[in-house]
Amino acid sequence: MTTIRVPTPLRPYTGGAKEVEVSGENVTQALGDLVQHYPDLKRHLFDDTGALRAYVNVFLNDDDVRTLQGEATPLKPGDRLMIIPSIAGGAPREERPGPSPSATIRPGSVPPRPA
Amino acid sequence: MANAPLVTTELDLSHDEILRYSRHLLMPEVGLAGQRKLKASSVLVIGTGGLGSPVALYLAAAGVGRLGLVDYDRVDFTNLQRQVIHGMGTVGQRKVDSARARLLDLNPDIRVETYDEPFTSENALRLSAPYDLVIDGTDNFPTRYLVNDVCVLTHKPNVYGSIFRFEGQVSVFWADRGPCYRCLFPEPPPPGLVPSCAEGGVFGVLPGTIGTLQATEALKLLLGIGEPLIGKLLLFDALGLSFEELRLKKNPRCRICSAEPEIHELIDYEAFCGVPGHDHEDGHLAREWEVEPAALAAELKAGKAVRLLDVREPHELEISRLPDATLIPLGSLASRLHELDSAEEMVVFCKSGTRSARALELLAGAGFRKVRNLYGGINEWARQVDPKLPRY
Ligand SMILES: [Zn+2]
């Protein structure tokens, strides 16, 4: 069994679970087992072709799996996988007293820059 | 690795300054020479919000001679839960002015330079040029990639900090000595997959912890003491009160800091990330797939059958709710679509309209055609229709 640490931004898709025990011989299988249990998580980790998304960082113990054998990196019992999220937060802007058009930007569309 | 000081020039201290910094001068790691170096050093702080507040306060207190502050926002009442550089007396003021006044009150011997403008590809090189080091205290992906790229292209260290709810990340990205932000995060997540802080909330003390760590790293780099967080990502979890340190390596295929980079100049970061880095004042125009709260209230009053779909989290209902709304949190909407009838007229809402816009995309993708988004969410409903509801 391998423990996967689920970062806060993804916990809504694991029913709030912070750590999940999964089985699998390598990183791909362990993540596959994870999304098997939590189907809502799947589109956050994998693209439509089933490949791990480029912005998903997976660390095995202290090391980025990309610096090991990538998704084929083998796992031993007691290993710990961590998914490291890209988080942008810092000083979130609040909505203005008036309506804020940026609050409803449609994903994928970028409004023109002001001149 | 020896941590060579970023700043080698020194400036003389006055008697008052010697007294002010005596607790630094007593430590040989800083000492008179180190304090004189700090006086000769300069730091650009991008953002004077949750992270920028402690960063700027501690750098000013420590005697960093010149601080630059970049922020185009104004102090809002809801900032005060964590942005401790501001106060009741400066609500409504420009953040950079509010911060500057506080910093000069703390330490009148430093210089504070303010830039009341967004940090953009057009001004980033000019604004960062006169500073030794840059602190990333921003709140959005486009600006984070921009800060990284400016620092890589100009060989400056980027002291990175980021927060989400109860968790934070800290690192020093310095391409000349280790990996950069793009080595770790080659691509931003697509818009909509990661909730913004404004939607996700943040534990007020968390930016204090993370920002103070950023200030710590900045001072170490300026002085050339200790071991900087280069090639390491520090993760902090406030609830477990745990720190974890992960090893980072330079990505040999990094688009900007590898041996054969593809990026040689600043790019359009909003296009790269697919989201705006800054508020665009394009006026108040509800789009065709949106409905104004007042207009919806009129429809309901006229007896039109409209299903209200609330995609917030259950705990948010304790703050405010609309009668007869169906609750399906955004995270579980995809797996609960069967509970909804695509033949029904539907209006989706959340706190301020961001999550419901995502829900709308999901519903449209699943074939729902009679769905609209409540413009501005339940907070805008409280403004336009029902002032008895609290806004949050
Ligand atoms: Zn890089």
Image: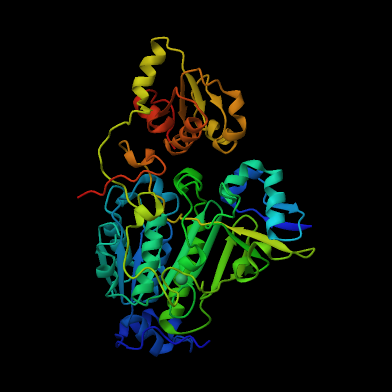
Choose top left, top right, bottom left or bottom right for residue A24. bottom right
Measured along the vertical axis of the image, is residue B279 above or below residue B220? above
**Total of numbered circles in the picture?**
0
Quadrant assignment for the C terminus of chain B: top left
Residue depicted at 60% across the width and 69% down the height:
B246
Q: Position of residue B49 (x, y in %)?
A: 39, 56
| Closer-to-camera residue (B103/B328) | B328
**Which residue is farthest front?**
A49
Q: Position of residue B59 (x, y in %)?
A: 39, 71
Task: Examine the rendering and report whether any part of residue B49 can be seen.
Answer: no
Measured along the vertical axis of the image, is residue B318 above or below residue B111? above
| Closer-to-camera residue (B318/B110) | B318
Q: Position of residue B306 (x, y in %)?
A: 46, 17
Measured along the vertical axis of the image, is residue B64 above or below residue B88? below
- Which colour scheme appears in the figure? rainbow
Residue depicted at 45% across the width and 75% down the height:
B258
